[in-house]
Image (cartoon, rainbow, N blue to C red):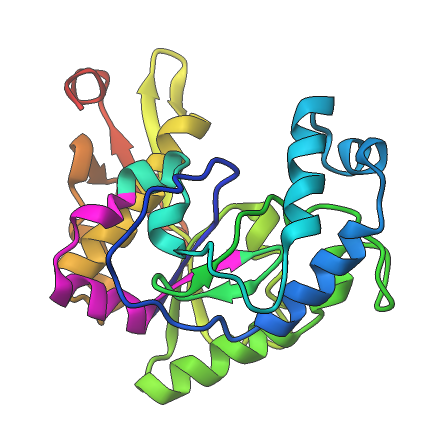
Amino acid sequence: MLTVISPAKRLDWSERDVEMTAPAFGGDAVALARTARGLSEAELGKLMDISPTLAKLNAERFQRFEETQDDVRPAALAFAGDTYQGLEAASLDPEDMRFAQERLRILSGLYGILRPLDAIQQYRLEMGSRLKTGKGTNLYAYWGDRLARALNEEAAGLGAETLINCASVEYFSAVDAEALTLDVITPQFLEDKPGGPKIVSFYAKKARGAMARFIIQRRLTDPAAILDFDVGGYEYAPDLSAPGKPAFLRREAAASAA
């Protein structure tokens, strides 16, 4: 099976002494960066709903973005948001990372699909951005069915038939459902609240990363094995689950201890 996660807005640009790989859609990233480069700071700010300071920063990043760039970092170590707090990629050992490189993929608005060790440049471009290109008015139109077809191809090479979706709705929506030939399993992470089980965004994002780490460290290839996930106090909750959407519930006491 393959697992997909979302990228993060926040980056950790610490130097890493690892051998990096080339992104499969690197040429597309350059093309999209050139398109974004044509926007003013004010237009970028409006496009990404960010402050003038962040708009200026990202305009400068797109200006520097080139096909060949020395200032790059491995994707799984460069992203630093909530999901990556759960993934803790920097603490994976070499064997873990080899398994992750083979079976973990990061969906990206700019790069399409990334392996953990793929070299990325500094950027911010959410998948939901309405960046106009020759293919349409947003990034979903730009990527079309190519991400789904790429995942199909990679899964076929592994003999895998299942995709564990630990990405957000925004990012997984870029994977064309009609073109995807894999069975999709989307874990749900809930907190046990007084008013009933509830998804809390911060905790759910972190749990998605922790699930990816769980799969990596246990070398899981059988989808049924993810039901044993118990990181951070979560337990499989069959009564809250639906086909293709296994639910994991965490009691408040466990959440406080996590």
The picture quadrant where one finds residue 2 is bottom left
Screen quadrant of the N terminus: bottom left
Please state the horizontal and vertical placement of residue 55, each as a whole percent of the image: 71, 32
Q: Nearer the viewer, residue 133 or 156?
A: 133
Please state the horizontal and vertical placement of residue 219, each as a whole percent of the image: 15, 66
Q: Looking at the image, is 59 positioned above or below residue 246?
A: above
Start-end of magenta stretch: 87-107
Screen quadrant of the C terminus: top left
Please state the horizontal and vertical placement of residue 223, each as a whole percent of the image: 27, 66
The picture quadrant where one finds residue 46 is top right
- Residue furthest to the front: 70
Q: Nearer the viewer, residue 83 or 166?
A: 83
Total number of numbered discs in the rendering: 0
Q: Nearer the viewer, residue 233 or 109?
A: 109
Query: Is residue 199 something that shows in the picture?
Result: no
- Residue furthest to the top: 194
98 horizontally vs 241: left or right: left
Q: Nearer the viewer, residue 88 or 226?
A: 88
- At a point 70% along the width and 27% down the height, the residue shown is 50
- At a point 22% along the width and 21% down the height, the residue shown is 255
The picture quadrant where one finds residue 140 is bottom right
Query: Is residue 255 something that shows in the picture?
Result: yes
- At a point 63% along the width and 73% down the height, the residue shown is 27
Tell me, yes or no, whether the highlighted magenta stretch contains residue 100. Answer: yes
- At a point 69% along the width and 46% down the height, the residue shown is 128
178 horizontally vs 47: left or right: left
Please state the horizontal and vertical placement of residue 253, each as a whole percent of the image: 17, 16
